[in-house]
Image (cartoon, rainbow, N blue to C red):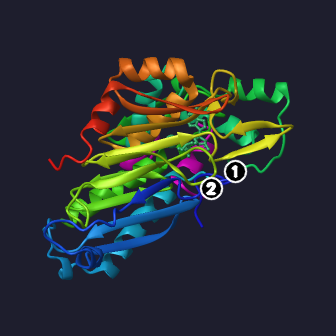
Amino acid sequence: MDRLETSKNRIKFFIIIILLPFVFASCSNEKAQDKLVVINGMTMGTTYTVKLVKGFKSAVAGEKVDYYLLKKGITQVLKQINQQMSIFINDSEISQFNRFRGSDWFRTSLDTARVIKQALSVSEKSNGAFDITVGPLVNLWGFGTRTVEGIPDEDEIKQSLNIIGYKNISVRLSPPAVKKRIREIYCDLSAIAKGFGVDRLAEYLDSEKISSYLIEIGGEVRARGKNNYNKWWRIGIASPTNTFGIQKVIDLKNRSMATSGDYRNYFEKDGIRYSHTINPKTGRPISHNLASVTVIDDSCLVADALATAISVLGPDKGYDFALKEDLAVFFVQKADNGFIEKSTPKFEKILDSRGDQN
Ligand code: ADP
Ligand code: MG
């Protein structure tokens, strides 16, 4: 299967999508359950789920939607994204760009150029905490296309640090193209590809005139309209312990949510946990006490990138950054005996509005 990331010690189903089994006003429980259609499969080395509501609030009258065709459409969209952005596919656009050794513009699809443009904008905002050129380091630590075990040499880390830096690439949209200033530049889009995939699927469902859906790829989600109980789609943020407990419950009102966590993809050596998120300043996996960062934003791509950026910045700088940028962010921090939660005022507001149906 196409892979955009490795999956060591991955806890699948990180975000638990809760569909409350309550009986609501106008429809019986059984009827509401019948209104839910689930389309799922594998993509980007993880799972995806698309939940749709038959009938009400959908411009396409329930039964008229051909779910078989819809699944085909969804599969095509995901396949195309992998072909554009997966470093695990040898002839994907990004792999070709990574092998390209010239200093001229390298033509790409508009999608790829747009994703890179947004990635660079998050890099600027986060002062380089988020950086798609971190690829050589991701590979060095064994989280990319190279399967290596253990800790790299100091020299290797230094060498890789010399060939990264988001300022060493430029992007343009018309005609779409990317350019590198250092021959060895190697871009890894894994930190935003899932978010972008969710946004593209939303666009696709919008184009099919479907107005109620919940899309999830590997834990990054986006909701539109109401669920099969005619309530807002309700999402649980999993607790960072391996017990599948729920830390927080959110009503996702026409928005996206992405979570970065150090317990999802890591290796352990001599009792130290090495995360797949790399600090581009040190060349090393992040090593603070942030267990997870959840960001809510209109765009899933932006939420996905920001969650990674804030993870790199850490609990204090990350929180200041979230305040400065007026973001809705929820932090779970490891403490001596358990976990501490922290959220920005914007996130609090979203929590407070839980249950409101407008
Ligand atoms: P998470 O959900 O934990 O944020 P993602 O899959 O979204 O995980 O992103 C992690 C992946 O992003 C890594 O496997 C690596 O390929 C890439 N990555 C690691 N560090 C950075 C960084 N500082 N900036 C951008 N991408 C990164
Ligand atoms: Mg991410």
Label ID, residue 257: none
95 or 287, which is in the foreground? 287
Report the disc number at residue 145: 1
- How many neighbours does mark 1 have within 10 angstroms: few (below 14), some (14-19), or many (20 or more)? some
Q: Is residue 193 above or below residue 43?
A: above
- Secondary structure, mark 2, is loop
Residue 61 visible in rendering: yes
- The reply to whether the magenta stretch includes residue 66 is no
Asked if the residue at tag 1 contacts the one at tag 2, i.e. Cβ–Cβ closer than 8 Å, the answer is yes
* Residue picked out by circle 2: 88
Left or right of residue 18, residue 212 in this image: left
Q: Position of residue 136 (x, y in %)?
A: 69, 37
Residue type at the position of mark 1 = Thr
Horizontal and vertical percent position of residue 317: 51, 18
Q: Amino acid at mark 2?
A: Phe
| Distance Cα–Cα, label 2 vs label 1 | 6 Å
Q: Quadrant of residue 207 in the image?
A: bottom left
Q: Is residue 289 above or below residue 354?
A: above
Magenta extent: 89-113
| Residue at x 59% of width, y 50% of height | 95
Whole-percent x, y for residue 272 in the image: 79, 35
Q: Secondary structure at mark 1?
A: loop
Where 318 sits versus 201, above or below?
A: above
Q: Nearer the viewer, residue 272 or 171?
A: 272
| Residue 90 falls inside the magenta stretch | yes
